[in-house]
Amino acid sequence: MGVGESGAALSGKRVLLVVGGGIAAVKIPDLIRRLRERGASVSPVLTRAGAEFVTPLSLSALAEEKVYTELFDLTDEAEMGHIQLSRQADIVLVAPATANLMARMVAGMADELATTVLMATDKPVMIAPAMNVRMWEHPATQRNLKQLRADGVLVAGPNEGSMACGEFGPGRMAEPLEIVDALGRHFGSGPLAGKRAIVTSGPTHEPIDPVRYIANRSSGKQGHAIARALGDLGADVVLVSGPTALPDPPGVETVHVETAVEMRDACEAALPADIAVCAAAVADWRAEAAGQKLKKQEGQPLPQLALAENPDILAGLAGRTTGRPELVIGFAAETQNVVEYATAKRKKKGCDWIVANDVSPATGTFGGDRNAVTLISAGEPETWPPMAKTEVAERLADRIAWYFGHDGPGAPE
Ligand code: PMT
C-alpha cells in the first residue's frame, strides 16, 4: 500500500501511542511526525522505561499534545482519568513493544499508566515489537506473542536486521513508515476497502432441552482468522460466530449466535455483501427441543430425538436470485476422497469456490492451529502446503483481493 492510501485511511484518526523502554524508542519522534503528516493525532503515553530513552518534552513538542506518564498524577486524573484516556483513541499503538512490556500485557498487569491504559481500553491494540534477537526468539516471548495474537492484538513487524546490540536477526522494530502502513491497512485502505464480507465461523449448538445440545468440535479458529485477514485487507467484515472460546477479532463486527437458524438469520441481516465465506461447521440437523430437562425414567423407553433438517446457509446465499454476494466461498469438511467430494459439494451448493480440508481425527484440523487445504474453483484444484490456519486465511484473503481486480500475491500459481 502506498503512503497516499495510508494517509487517507489515517486522516482524523486518534492514536494513543504507548512508548516502551527500548533503544528503538529513538524512532518514535519520526513515527509521530509520519502519523501527523497523514492527518492522525497522537497522544503519547510514556512508560517509566520509555522515559529513559525519549523525553516527554520532545514527544509533546512533536505531537502537540500532552504526554502522559504516571498513573497517580492527580492533575491528569482530575483532567482525564486513565479509563477515558484509553477510550478516546481509535487505536492504541505500543511502540517499541519490548519483551517486558509484552509479558506484562499477557499477564494483565496494570502497574503503571501505560499498562493500565492497555488493560482498560476497548479499542484495537497494535504492537510493534522491538528487542534483541535472542529475546525475540525466546520461547517465553514467542508464547507471549501467540497469546497476544489470540487476545486480538495486531502485530506490526518486527523486521530482520542488524541491531543496536551488534547482533543480527529478527527483533528490529518495523520502520515508522511500515507501522504507519500497518495502521492504514487496519483502518481500511487495503485492496478490499469498500467491499463488504460475511464470514461464518465455529460450530452451532442445537438444543435438545434447556441444558443439552448437539454440537461439533469446530473451534472457530479458521473462520475467525479469515474474518480478521479480510479486515486487515480493508474489507468491512461481519463475522457470524457460533459459540467459541475465541475473542472477537479486532476491527470486525462480530455477531454471536447459537443455532443454525440464528446463523442463517444473522447472515441474511448482514446482506448486502460482496463476499461470503462460510467456514462454520453448521449442524445439519436440529432436534425438537424439549421445554424442560429430559428426565431419566426407570423402566421407560429411552427418549427419541426427532430431528429436522437445518437451513443450508451456504446454499441459501449462493442460490439467491437477488442480492447474491458476488463471490460465495464454502468449506468442505471431508474424511475421504477429499477433492472429489468437495468438487461435487461445490456444484451442489452453487458456490463459486470451495476450500476442501481433510477433517479425519488424525489431521487435527478440527480445533487445531494448522490446516491443509485444496482450493476448488471452476479451474484446476489447487492444493496448498500444510500451514497455520492464520496463513490459510491470509492466502485466501489475498486470493479474494486478487479476484476483485487488484494485483498482489493472491494470483493463482
Ligand atoms: O473451526 P476450526 O476448529 O478452526 O475448524 C475449521 C473447520 C474444519 C470447521 C473448517 O475449516 C471447515 O471445514 N468448515 C466447514 C465445516 C462443514 O460443516 O463442512 P460441510 O462439508 O459439512 O459443509 C459444507 C459447507 O456448507 C460449509 O461451508 C458449511 O459452512 C456450509 N453449511 C453446511 C451446513 C449448513 N446447514 N449450512 C451451511 O452453510
Image (tube, rainbow, N blue to C red):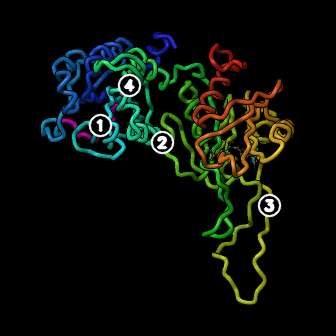
Query: In the displayed structure, would residue 332 be above or below residue 52?
Result: below
Which of 215/98 is in front?
A: 98
What residue appears at the point 68 percent right and 28 percent down from the top-left corner? Answer: 274
Q: Label 2: how many residues lie within 10 Å, few (<14), some (14-19) or many (20+)?
A: some
At numbered mark 2, what does the secondary structure look like: helix, strand or loop? helix
Locate the C terminus and report the quarter of the image it occupies: top right
The kind of residue tagged 1 is Asn
The kind of residue tagged 3 is Ala
Cα–Cα span, label 1 and label 3: 54 Å
Cα–Cα span, label 2 and label 1: 18 Å
At numbered mark 4, what does the secondary structure look like: helix, strand or loop? strand
Query: In the displayed structure, would residue 85 be above or below residue 159?
Result: below
The kind of residue tagged 4 is Gly
Q: Nearer the viewer, mark 4 or mark 3?
A: 4
Q: Quadrant of residue 32?
A: top left
Left or right of residue 164: residue 385:
right
Question: What residue is shown with label 4?
Answer: 171
Whether residues under marks 1 and 3 lie with C-beta atoms below 8 angstroms apart, the answer is: no
Whether residues under marks 3 and 2 lie with C-beta atoms below 8 angstroms apart, the answer is: no
The kind of residue tagged 2 is Ala
Q: Nearer the viewer, mark 1 or mark 3?
A: 1
Left or right of residue 208: residue 2:
left
What residue appears at the point 24 percent right and 29 percent down from the top-left corner? Answer: 21
| Range drawn in magenta | 79-92
Q: Which mark is residue 374?
A: none
Is 30 a magenta residue?
Answer: no
Question: What residue is shown with label 2?
Answer: 150
Q: Nearer the viewer, mark 4 or mark 2?
A: 4
Cα–Cα span, label 4 and label 1: 14 Å
Whether residues under marks 4 and 1 lie with C-beta atoms below 8 angstroms apart, the answer is: no
Question: What residue is shown with label 3?
Answer: 308
Counting residues from the start of the chain, the first of labels 4 and 3 encountered is: 4
